Amino acid sequence: MLAALSRVKIPRRPSSELLLRCIFEQKVERGELSPLTLSSVTCSRKVGGVRDVSTSSTLCTKVRGNSKKREMSEKKLTRHFVDHRRVKLVAGSGGKGASSFHSEPRKEWGGPDGGNGGDGGSIIIKADRFVKSLAQVVPVYKGEDGESGGSKNCYGRNGSPTYIRVPLGTVVKEQGKTILDMTEHGQEYLAAFGGAGGKGNRFFLSNENRSPMTATPGITGQERLLQLELRTMAHAGLVGFPNAGKSSLLRAITNARPAVAAYPFTTLNPHVGIVKYRDHEQVAVADIPGIIRGAHLNRGLGISFLRHIERCRFLLFVLDLSAPEPWTQLQHLRYELDQYEPGLSQRPQAIIANKMDLSEAQEKLETLKSHVSQRVIPVSALTGQNTEELILHLRELYDGYLQGGGNG
Ligand SMILES: Nc1nc2c(ncn2[C@@H]2O[C@H](COP(=O)(O)OP(=O)(O)OP(=O)(O)O)[C@@H](O)[C@H]2O)c(=O)[nH]1
Ligand SMILES: [Mg+2]
């Protein structure tokens, strides 16, 4: 029996992918995980060439690299990238005040000399542009306690503040309510106040009471339970059903390298790529994992990614022209976005008809155009065909956003 079993070949890769996906989806459902990639940003920093619309021939891309390598990187990123954390903060307590009396030879009644306790250390959340994910944030932070006061009027040392460094774009929430948005490098938020130090008996010295015995304990530090949430900060978001070719398109127009494969939910984390223009303007484009019907009810990869779309200034709806009715895809996508946040689908947008290299695409493109009022940009992410028009339109959207008071 065992020998027979050992002869059965079990395909290794598909099962491990399935396992990874199951684990991931379960974690996302439980709200423990909704990773978003850091690498993409790092990738995009590596971009050497400047995007120039007159050199469209360089835009043609192939799906490069071997699939094993890409898969590895995606797994690695899933493991290391964290965009959601619940943290318990307990600020340091104040040190207790001392109760003592000065005494030395020939000066027996020197009076009270108990010093005050030091203040407890506060906990401060600080935005840092060098931090790229919430992976370093631990579940519990305990502030440093203040030291107790001593005799001879010695004051206790204050507890030093504890800093929690978070990436730009982190939203701090308490009981589901947004408290603040960390958008600037160096921005600080005093999240939990340290307790005040207790008073030593010297403090209670008065004309009425020349030898007070009283000394007070320090006050306990503030306790809070906060949620930290990291949202993608990209100008444009590629929104589409799984397999529509979003990742391929990001590869075609930027130097980011998200994984591309012929099965749905290849992309598990948003990737950000940068389109560079000759005048040094840069537009960040995010490849967001595929959205399916019912995503607003947390189906598929669910709500966690709709959260990232919310942050994008404009949307690029990517439609798969090899699908039987690409225009229904668009309706479903809009519906999902609006269910998540009313009006979200009305952001400045472009409709991208992808996979134009396929034979039946041209016909469907005409039908699609008759179904929608917005501009439709036909492209092929695989061959790079017409990505130039997309890049130009992206710039128009970006300029429109800047004129509308955006600060990039
Ligand atoms: N023929 C053709 N195939 C394409 C084109 N763009 C993407 N594909 C193929 O479509 C499949 C899916 O592409 P991806 O870029 O992974 O799609 P995606 O939208 O990122 O998918 P998810 O990450 O699963 O949401 C891959 O097999 C691609 O090679 C295109 O323009 N033409
Ligand atoms: Mg993808």
Image: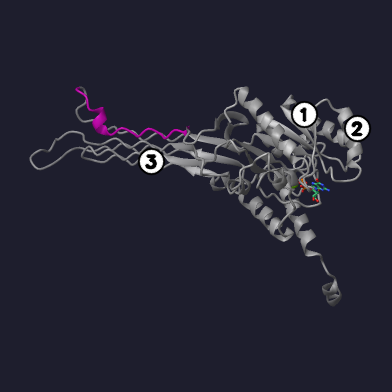
Q: Earlier in the sequence, mark 1 or mark 3?
A: 3
Please, what is the three-letter code of the amino acid marked with disc 2? Thr
| Rendering coords of residue 118 (x, y %) | 33, 37
Q: Nearer the viewer, residue 155 or 81?
A: 81
Q: CA distance from mark 3 to mark 2?
A: 66 Å
Residue ranking furthest to the front: 54
| Rendering coords of residue 10 (x, y %) | 82, 66
Q: CA distance from mark 1 to mark 3?
A: 46 Å
Q: Nearer the viewer, residue 382 or 6?
A: 382
Ligand 2 closer than 8 Å to label 3 CB:
no
Element assignment for label 2: helix
Residue picked out by circle 2: 367
Tell me the number on the disc at residue 160.
3
Horizontal side of 385 relative to 141 (left or right) equals: right
Residue picked out by circle 1: 339
| Rendering coords of residue 243 (x, y %) | 80, 46
Q: Earlier in the sequence, mark 3 or mark 2?
A: 3
Q: Residues within 10 Å of mark 1 (few under 14, many from 20)?
A: some
Is 68 contained in the magenta span?
Answer: no
Viewer-nearest of labels 3 and 2? 2
Horizontal side of 100 relative to 172 (left or right) equals: left
Q: Residue at x 22, y 28 (%)?
A: 205
